[in-house]
Image (cartoon, rainbow, N blue to C red):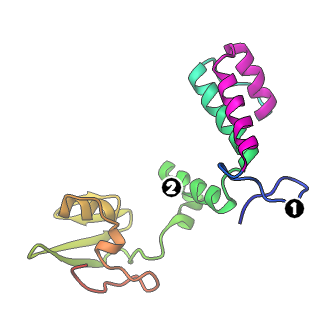
Amino acid sequence: MRTTRQGKNTALPRPGENTATDEGVLAQLAALQHMSVNELKIKWEALLGTTAPNNARAFLELRISHRIQELTYGGLSRDTRRTLELLADEVEGKVARKNMAADPRNPMPGTRLIREWEETEHTVTVLGDGYDWQGRKYRSLSAVAKAITGVNWNGFRFFRLDKRLGHHRGSEP
């Protein structure tokens, strides 16, 4: 669902839908390049409602550019923001909400996943905080799959884990 402007029921435009809107945004973005750092800081306060955190021109331009586009075209959806917050919590090791980001496809710790790849059987043991393959600990099944195959894989797909039941469904894709 598209975000709507506050108090209105009209959907926000998408880039490329309205030439006049796009040209207005591009003009604002181009104008940033000609502003002094002090002018950028004033623009920051007007758009973000806080004092600019530093004097780094590139940072100020980038964040202000993002905010201009966000105000015109809309920001991230609530679901996307929530997912990013949960992932950030998980990366930072915040225990309070860490389990909320856990994937329901993850098998219980102690489960052994067996996958044949290029005529070799690979056994991965599920740990409470990662996976063990050949005595080496990995943070994700995707990392294990890459170690086995040498290419990027979705770990759940590689190990054929059922989305609902969290069990092994077979070998080769």
Residue 171: % across, % down:
22, 82
The crowd level at tag 2 (other Cα within 10 Å; few <14, some 14-19, many 20+) is some
Residue 5 lies left or right of residue 97; in this view the side is right
The amino acid on which the numbered mark 2 sits, given as a three-letter code, is Glu
Distance Cα–Cα, label 2 vs label 1: 36 Å
Residue 168: % across, % down:
31, 84
Give the farthest residue toward the front. 19
Residue at (31% x, 86% y) in the render: 169
Position of residue 161 relative to residue 10, above or below, is: below
Picture quadrant of residue 141? bottom left
Residue 3 lies left or right of residue 171; in this view the side is right
Q: Nearer the viewer, mark 2 or mark 1?
A: 1
Residue 72: % across, % down:
75, 44
Residue identifier under label 2: 90
Q: Nearer the viewer, residue 125 or 159?
A: 159
25 inside magenta stretch = yes
Start-end of magenta stretch: 18-47
Q: Secondary structure at mark 2?
A: helix
Picture quadrant of residue 11? bottom right
Q: Secondary structure at mark 1?
A: loop
Locate the C terminus and report the quarter of the image it occupies.
bottom left
Q: Nearer the viewer, residue 20 or 58?
A: 20
Locate the N terminus and report the quarter of the image it occupies.
bottom right
Q: Which mark is residue 114?
A: none
The crowd level at tag 1 (other Cα within 10 Å; few <14, some 14-19, many 20+) is few
The amino acid on which the numbered mark 1 sits, given as a three-letter code, is Asn
Residue identifier under label 1: 9
Give the farthest residue toward the left. 119
Residue at (20% x, 77% y) in the render: 115
Mark 2 and mark 1 lie on one chain; the one further toward the N terminus is 1
Residue 83: % across, % down:
58, 60
